Amino acid sequence: MTLAGFLLYFGTNIDNALVLIACLAGHDHGRRRAVIALFCAGLLVLLVSLVLSEALDDFGAWPLNLLGLAPLTLGLWGLWSGWDGAHAAKHTGTLAMIGLTLSNSTDSLATMVSLLAERPDYVRLPVAAGYIAGMLAMMAVVGLLLNRLAGAERLKRWAGRIGPLVMIGFGLFILADTAGDRL
């Protein structure tokens, strides 16, 4: 389950990493701002997920599967509108980057709540540990890549395409009523 938490964080935050890199590449203190944004948003999503999953764990899998509509809708909207987060580049302060990352983390929240609420309580700690490990790994990767990709126009274009596709994939996974919903 630790691996599930790691993959959940990494999979649902690839879009955040790409958007932060596209917004902050070449900016003063860009690395620090990106790491702080990923850390604050990731920690808040984890805490809210743990609280919500505890409140919702008595529900059956079917209503919880409806949480998949959030990332699915956001992913489809992102593909349709062509949103790439580049409009946030003019407001690259740390708080703006935390807000951008949080606003782009509903897929993480919905996926984490669905995963935790559909499983026994004892898996919460290993999943949370894997989630935190994924968050630390993502912060390290973004920190290493950020200054090396200054002015990467290709990355700005791909950030708007990859993020929505990842959200659509996780949304469909949550919506699917699989045998793993009640391990």
Image (tube, rainbow, N blue to C red):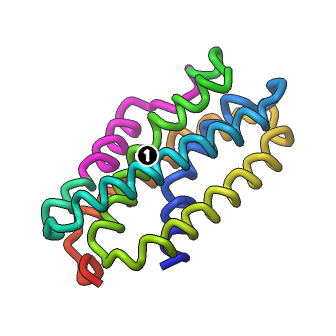
Q: Position of residue 113 (x, y in %)?
A: 34, 59
Left or right placement of residue 169 versus residue 2 in this view: left
Identify the residue shown where x is 80% and y is 25%. Answer: 27
Q: Quadrant of the rendered structure where residue 158 is?
A: top right
117 to 103, vertically: above or below? below
Element at label 1: helix
Q: Position of residue 107 (x, y in %)?
A: 39, 49
Give the camera-side residue of 19 and 120: 120
Give the magenta part as a residue range. 69-87
Give the camera-side residue of 32 and 179: 32
Give the camera-side residue of 48 and 137: 48
Give the camera-side residue of 22 and 111: 111
Mark 1 sits on what residue?
A: 164
Q: Position of residue 144 (x, y in %)?
A: 82, 49
Identify the residue shown where x is 24% and y is 80%. Answer: 182
Q: Quadrant of the rendered structure where residue 120 is?
A: bottom left
Residue 154 in view here = no
- Report crowding for label 1: few under 14, some 14 to 19, many 20 or more residues within 10 A (C-alpha): many
Q: Position of residue 87 (x, y in %)?
A: 56, 20
86 to 137, vertically: above or below? above
Quadrant where the C terminus is found in the figure: bottom left
Left or right placement of residue 165 versus residue 32 in this view: left
